[in-house]
Each structure stands twice: as C-alpha cells, then as structure tokens.
Image (spheres, rainbow, N blue to C red):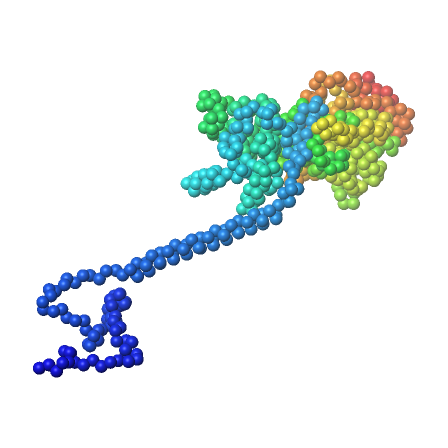
Amino acid sequence: MGSGKKKGGRKEPLFGLPAALADLRLTAADRIPGGGDDKPKKSAGKRKAEPSDDEPPRERKAPAKSSGAKRRSKSSFSAGLGRLVYWGAVLSLWGVIAVIGVVIWVGAHLPPIQSLEIPKRPPTIQIVGMDGSLLAQRGEMAGANVSLKDLPPYLPKAFIAIEDRRFYSHFGIDPIGILRALVTNVLHRGVSQGGSTLTQQLAKNLFLTQERTMARKLQEAELAIWLERKHSKNEILELYLNRVYFGSGAYGVEAAAQKYFGKPAKSVTVAEAAMLAGLVKSPSRLAPNRNPEGAEARAKIVLAAMADASFITEAQAQASIGHPSYNVKPVGAGTVNYVADWIGEVLDDLVGQIDDSIKVETTIDPKLQAVAETAVIDELAAKSVKFNVSQGALVAMTPDGAVRAMVGGRNYSDSQYNRAVTAKRQPGSSFKPFVYLTAMEQGLTPDTVRQDAPIEVKGWKPENYTHEYFGAVTLTQALAMSLNTVAIRLGLEVGPKNVVRTAHRLGISSKLEPNASIALGTSEVSVVELVGAYAPFANGGFAATPHVVTRIKTLDGKLLYMRPADEHNQVIEPRYVGMMNTMMRETLISGTAKKADIPGWQAAGKTGTSQDYRDAWFIGYTSNLVTGVWLGNDDNSPTKKATGGGLPVEVWTRFMRTAHEGVQVAGLPNLQNNWGPANLVQISSQVSPPTQAATGPASAPVSNGGYRAPPPTRANVNARPEAAAGLDGWLMDRLFGGNR
C-alpha cells in the first residue's frame, strides 16, 4: 500500500551552485566535431532515458555538417582573398613609388627640360678643288634642311612603314610596339626587333649618346614624351628626316640622297626612298657604297612594309624591286683625303674655332690629283714586291707654291698617315743642290773642277754609289752623277753651317745638323718642304710657301679668309738660279735621272737615295710644275736596292707627262752657258785644268741654251788634270765652246 510518496524516492531541495548546475545539459552541438577518444563520457546518473518497449526503434541518422564549420571555411577563403588584395595593393603602391623614383632620377640626370633646345648641327667642312668640285668633306655630311612638304610623300612614309607604323597614334612611346618587339625577340631567342619609336630615335640622336644601357633608354623615353608635347607629329618627322644618320658620313635625307644617288631628296624614286629608309637600321653595314647587295635586300623589306601599310600598291612595290639607281663612288684609296687632313690641321690657324659650316676653296686640280694617285698606286702595285717598297708619296705644286696634287700614301683607307706632310725621311743626294748653291754663291761655277777621290773625315769614309772614282770633274758632272766625295769636299769647303742656312732660306723648316754628312742629306725632311725648297729654282729665285687653301667662306657666302698675295722675296739671285738649273738639267740628260723626260719641255731635278736604300727620292721641275716623289717603307726598313733614279723617276715621268699635256711650253728661268768675267777668274784659279780623259771632249752648247756637260770617265784617283792644249786653249774651249 502506498505511503503517498511519488515513485522514485524523495528529492531533496538544492541551493547555491548545485542548484544552478542542476539543469545544465550538453548537446551534440556543444561537442567538438570528431572528438574521438577525447569525447566526454555521459555520467552514470545522467543517462538519457531508454526507449520504452512500446515504441519502435528510430532510425539513426548520420550527423550533418555543422553550420559553424561552414562559416569558418568561408571565413578562411575570404581572409586569403583579402590578404592577396592587400599585398597586391601594397606592391602596386611600391611599384608606383619606384616608377616615380626612377622618373625623378632619370629627370635629375637630364638637363632642365625647359632649357632643352634642338641643337644646332655640328659644322661641316666642304673641301672643293680649284674647279669648284667637291673633293672631300669633314665633320657631319649634313645636307640642307628640307621641309616635309617639299619631299615626295612616299619618302617619309617609307620610314614610318619600316620604323614606326603607329607613329601618328602613339604619345612618343608605343606600348603595343614594345610588347610586339618583346614577343618577337622571345620567339627568336634574341634581339631581332626593336620597339623604339621615331620620336625616341630622334631624342637619342639629338640629346643622348649611342650607349646601350637601361639608363639611356629611360632618358630616351622621357625625352620622347617631352618632344611629343613640345612639337607636332609633322615637326618631329621633319626633324628626324633631317638628322638621322645614313652612313658614309651622311646625316639627313638631303645629304644621303646626294651621297648615294647624286640628286636632291625631292627627286628620289620609290626604290631609292626604300633604300634610304632601310639604311637606318644599320647605316655602316648597309651603306650601298660598302654593301650594295645588303642595301638592296633591305630595300625589298621596306617596299613590302610600305605595301602592307597601303602606302604604295603591290604593283609599285614589285616594280621598284632591284631598281635603285644609286650613284656612289667605289671605296678605294681616296688619296685626296690626305689633302683634307692637311687642311684640317691648318684651319685653326686660318679662321680659329669653327661654329658654322664652311666651304674651303683649294688649289688642288682634281684631274692632276687623279693622275698622281694612279701613278703612285700603279707603280707600287707592279714593282713593290720586286723592290720591297710598300709606300709612296707625291707632291706637285706650281713654282709659286700652290699645291696641285698630293698623295700621302698608296691607300687612305688602309693608313691615314700622311707621308707627304707628316713623315720626315733622309733626303739623301736630293739635298745636294743646297750644297752646290752655297758654293755658287761663294764664287764657284758649274765649270769649277773638284777631285772625285776617296776621302776620310774623322774616321768616316764616305763612298760613291758605284764605288768608282772619276778624278777631276766639274761641279756639273759631280752633281749630275751624284758623286758623294765631291759633295763632301764642297760642303766642308763652303761650311756646313752655310749649307744649313741656304736650305732654311729656300724653305726647309726641319732641324738640320751642320756636320760633314749634311752634304749627303742625313738630316730628315718632309716631301712637301723639300719640294717647296726646289720651287725657287723653277720660278727665278723667289721664295715659295707650299699652300693649298685660297679662300674660306660660310655656306651662305660670308668670306672668312682669303690668302694674301705673295711677297716677291728674292732668295736666290737670278744668276745663280741659271747656274743651278744648268747643272740640275744635266741630271736628266746624262746623270742619274736619264729616264725622266717630258717631250718638248726643259726639266731639271735631282735624285736621292738614303743609306742602305731606305729612301728613294726624285725632285724634278719645269717652269710649270715642281714635283717630288718618295718611295720607301714606314718602318724604315731597307728596300731591295730601290734608288732615286728608278721607281721615283718612273712615277714622276708618268705624272709629269700627263700634267703637261696641252700646256704652253716655257723654258727654265735664266738658263745660260756663259758665266761672264767671274767665270774666267774662277777657272783661272784652278790648280790645273782637267785632262781630256777626266772631262772628255768639250761639249757644244745645246739648242736650249743650257750647258750640257759630258759624262765623266773613270780615272786614276791620284792623277792630276793637265791641259790638253795649254791653259789658254782649255779656257777658250770652256768659255766659247770649242769644237763647235
């Protein structure tokens, strides 16, 4: 029987903390997912009520993913995306800052943009011949500025087609072009295409160097943007066409058209325009005068680009292929450039600093220059190996010093060293006329007799070239046969210092040593000064300064320099001029220069060969031209017995014969065979007259009035000259031409 209590027993009331925790229950949501062994166990007293026997068992469902896990997954993705955006923004900001910094750095290394101006062209020096033809050019070969409207429309379009197709649409830099070039270079695994615009190329040409650095490229880009803001597209294109380099020293389309086609830029054809545009890529390598095949191949590419851009039709492109009528001078010796270099050396003394382009008018005769060049080059080509001679020089001038032709070497492109002006070599016997002139001025005459015999000077024993001696000979014979012992004796007799003074008075400017060997030309001189020192013999005794410049003007006609009239400074008395011409004429008649001959003309001169055959000279002249030839080796090595009477005389004769064609014949000044009373006194003062064996029979005067001495014969060096018919008879024969 129930006692009235509920089943389950009595429940005591709870207070405090136990009361607060009495109803606390954990659910599945409160557990950590995948708890495993760490899942808290249910307390024995708090089990969940078992299902009753009357209820069917419920199917157990798999636990679903909790909503908290979903939230955490989305939160993780959002956080990663946020971090990516954040760091991307940070990096972009730093990139912008870096770009700004680079721009500032590049700008800091440029001149102030506001002070930049299109620079003036460097001055050009045009060198023209006496006929006004262009001989050479120094500095940039820049033609006159041409306006865009004066050019045929296909000329500028050729440059746009091949260099900057999007020229009219970009802002100085072409990002699309840069990207295209980058892709092309990657595909070709090398630099096969550039991304520079015409504006960038102009900026580089105007303001920057050609160095290939990142700094220079950045400066180029900044300046290109500045040019685009300051100038219109057409102004930029016009500037570009007038400044771009086309090779062979030509800057601008006008200079290039004149250089390669012999016509102004406004007259070039489509084919010629394509060739000009093609040169920009590599002007030195593709210049038509150096590489015509390469230039034509590049022109085909340009024509195809022009057709692709619809600047010309396909028919025009095909018709223009292979038809550039370029007219260029072949690359050769270019010996006139030796003249141009010489002019460049004296310009500063004549006009000072050059700020504007100038034209230099010269005394050079282009025809004679070509003849001189051919004479030197052809003779060396034929005989340089035989005689071991590698170089030559020639100077031809009028008797008043105006240089008509100058060859400073066999090929200017191989060596720019000017052997006619800069090189100094021993003149050998070609120096002897100064010894003999000094003797004439001290009272001797061409008929004065001196002994050709061995001589010793302080242990030095000079010999004749042939090692033969002819005994008593006249000074005319001694000079014609180039007898060394007579020259030494004569030099010591008149005094080496006096010989040096004579040479300097006539025009030798080099330092000369006043010793016994000066008579044999042991002091070095240049070709041009030696030729200039012979000029007084050809002009009647007046000083002649070698010169090549007559006038200098700016291109607009302003006169900067004009050569003043020469002062008639008499350096040789006419009487002695006649004596020297008589003696040196004999050199060409019976002496060492018998091969030298100009039909119809009186000519005189002297050969020279230095010690060990190192130098071979001949200086010869008429009343029209004075010409000197030197042959030898730059390293001063001996030749294979090349003498002044051999190759130099052949070169001289070949040149002088052509140079005198069509020129009115004139005789040498003051030629005579009567030396007046002084001659009688001089001859009477000889120790004894020469023997018939020593001098040969008396010679009759030649038709031109000059005395023709007989060649000396070999004689006993100890024999003394004796009179054949007494002293009086010998004097009469010598004075009045016995046996006439």
The image quadrant of residue 427 is top right
Query: Looking at the rendering, in which quadrant would you find the C terminus?
Result: top right
- Residue at position x 66%, y 31% from top? 137
Q: Could you say where residue 553 lies in the image, as x and y percent from the top left?
A: 74, 29
Q: Could you say where residue 45 lies in the image, as x and y percent from the top left?
A: 20, 77
Q: Could you say where residue 13 lies in the image, as x and y percent from the top left?
A: 24, 80
Q: Nearer the viewer, residue 586 or 503?
A: 503
Image check: 680 left or right of 243?
A: right
The image quadrant of residue 449 is top right
Q: Nearer the viewer, residue 475 or 616?
A: 616
- Residue at position x 75%, y 33% from top? 530
Query: Looking at the rendering, in which quadrant would you find the N terminus?
Result: bottom left
Residue 495 visible in the displayed image: yes
Vertically, is 240 above or below 38?
Answer: above
Q: Could you say where residue 293 lies in the image, as x and y percent from the top left?
A: 50, 29
- Residue at position x 77%, y 39% from top? 510
Vertically, is 577 above or below 50?
Answer: above
